[in-house]
């Protein structure tokens, strides 16, 4: 069985709490200095957390063997291509403009799907499902 990284679970829990606080502050239109400070601190935390996850994914990617990297790349390309095709198809059906920035959403979702287990689970070898001792 895969074990979770306690640091990542703690940071993710803090992310969820900060997102809930930010949504409540914005939804209730709280204009106090404390509310603005919480929203700014929450946004900074979100950006730092995303940066941390990107660095962690890159570091763990270098530790994988060649077959695992190839498999993850193919999985990413499949998800990215499929999500992009669906996005373009929906844009054509609803007759909205296709903007180049819309591809970042497909890219982010594909990266998240491809590297979710690498970021949140402890595992030495990702290709054979061998868990650490």
Image (spheres, grey):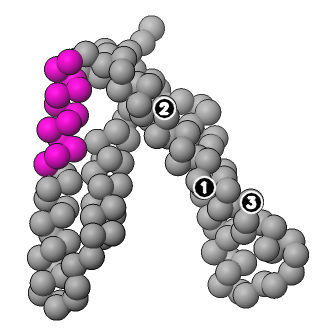
As rendered, which of 59 and 9 lies closer to the eye?
Answer: 59
| Earlier-in-chain disc, 1 versus 3 | 3
Is 114 positioned to the left or the right of 53 in the image? left
> Residue 109 lies in what quarter of the image?
bottom left
Q: Determine which residue is flagged by label 2.
A: 56
Q: Which residues are magenta?
A: 66-78
Query: Residue, x 41% and y 31% (percent of image)?
Result: 58
Q: Determine which residue is flagged by label 1.
A: 46
| Disc 1: CA contacts within 10 A as few (<14), some (14-19) or many (>=20) | some
Q: Are marks 1 and 3 in contact (CB under 8 Å)?
A: no
SS assignment at label 3 = helix
Q: Determine which residue is flagged by label 3.
A: 41
> Residue 65 lies in what quarter of the image?
top left
View extreme (front): residue: 100
Whole-Å distance between the Cαs marked 1 and 3? 9 Å
Q: Can you see residue 106? A: yes
Residue 127 position (above or below residue 15): above
**Which quarter of the figure is the C terminus placed in?**
top left
The mark total stands at 3
């Amino acid at each position: 069985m895969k074990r979770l990284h306690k640091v990542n679970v703690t940071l993710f829990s803090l992310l969820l709490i900060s997102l809930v606080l930010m949504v409540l502050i914005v939804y209730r239109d709280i204009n106090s200095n404390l509310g603005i400070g919480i929203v700014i601190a929450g946004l900074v935390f979100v950006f730092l957390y995303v940066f941390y996850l990107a660095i962690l994914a890159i570091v763990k990617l270098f530790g994988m063997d060649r077959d695992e990297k190839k498999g993850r790349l193919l999985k990413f390309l499949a998800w990215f291509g499929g999500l992009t095709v669906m996005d373009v198809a929906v844009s054509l059906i609803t007759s909205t403009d296709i903007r180049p920035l819309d591809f970042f959403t497909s890219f982010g979702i594909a990266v998240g799907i491809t590297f979710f287990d690498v970021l949140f689970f402890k595992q030495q070898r990702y290709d054979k499902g061998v868990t650490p001792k």
